[in-house]
Amino acid sequence: MGTKSLKRRLRESQNPPMAAAATPWRKPRSYATPSVLLTAFLTVSVISLLVLSSNKWRAFQSGSSYETVTVVNVFPHDPQAFTQGLVYHKNDILFESTGLYGKSSIRKVALQTGKVEDVQKMDGSLFGEGLTLLNDRLFQVTWLQKAGFIYNLKNLSKIGTFNHDMKDGWGLATDGTFLFGSDGSSTLYQIDPQTFKAVSKQVVYYKSHEVHNLNELEYINGEIWANVFMTDCIVRISPDDGRVLGWILLQNLRKELMEAGNNDIDVLNGIAWDGEQKRIFVTGKLWPKLYEIKVSPLKKPIEEGFIEKVCLRRPFKFP
Ligand SMILES: *[C@@H]1O[C@H](CO)[C@@H](O)[C@H](O)[C@H]1NC(C)=O
């Protein structure tokens, strides 16, 4: 919403509340002038309250929403899984791609028990990355390579390879038609699932800052949700123009795991969406738990500079 439309809205909405609010203050004639002033003041107050409380205005002010999470359910997760891609299928079945040389795999996982029901180990020269599911095929990208793999959903057998247009393979998601990809930069790619060419690219900005290190992706209700590597933040992106719609702060999850003695866990990574039951799942690399979360707005306004400090990092450089 632009300033123009806001002004227009203010002008348009001024007349009815003015008339309504005027009535109780009109009676004592001698107070006509103060009452007019008071009426005007009240009218402005009422309008301000109405406008301030509308979501549109809040979005207009900050450009983004800021949200925190509460844990709805905790499930076991293989603490050996260096999670790089996570997808919910159906009937409490997840598919997961794991990284690290010699430990990379694609696997079918039971949500409730965390049990790995099927696994396809990858060649030792490959480092598994983002994963998505389109038309009963699993698409996976790999780190430091342009090569990706396609697997049969039923038995995880490899049915194809592809070369993508991105600089590297980090995250994958799909809206059911196109693939979306990330390569660790601030660019979100929209990819044709037949040719694997990027059909559009959007650089993601928060205020004037590029959001670097876009990692694991998930498509949720018309938005792309992305883990930001080296942070406990998920950024919500508009796939149409790369605009940051909001930030989800998940610091509490890794903190609690560390406090419980899980000292070897790595970063938050992996977002899965069960569209049928509207469930959101997140986990991390080498995390012993997978969480179903609910997202809700922060109770207090965000501190100036908080997102810059906590959710934005310099571009990752391969050591
Ligand atoms: C996997 O399933 C496909 C068809 O569903 C079949 O053609 C293929 O042979 C199977 N692969 C393995 C390794 O069982």
Image: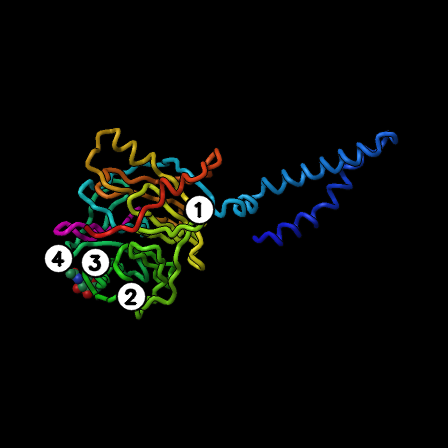
In this rendering, the answer to whether 130 lies above or below 36 is: below
User: Tags 4 and 2 in contact by the CB under 8 Å rule?
Assistant: no
Question: Mark 4 Cα within 10 Å, few/some/many (few <14, many 20+)?
Answer: few
Instruction: From the image, tell me which residue sits under label 4.
Output: 125
C-alpha distance separating marks 3 and 1: 29 Å
Amino acid beneath label 3: Leu
Amino acid beneath label 4: Ser
**Magenta stretch contains residue 102:** yes
Where ligand 1 lies, by image quadrant? bottom left
Instruction: From the image, tell me which residue sits under label 1.
Output: 246
Q: Secondary structure at mark 3?
A: loop
Q: Which residues are magenta?
A: 92-107
Comparing 310 with 195, the one in front is: 310
Structure colour scheme:
rainbow
The label on residue 165 is: 2
Q: Position of residue 40 (x, y in %)?
A: 74, 38
C-alpha distance separating marks 2 and 1: 27 Å
The residue located at (38%, 50%) in the rendering is: 225
The residue located at (85%, 31%) in the rendering is: 27
Q: Earlier in the sequence, mark 4 or mark 2?
A: 4
Comparing 152 with 208, the one in front is: 208
**Magenta stretch contains residue 169:** no
C-alpha distance separating marks 4 and 2: 21 Å
Amino acid beneath label 1: Gly
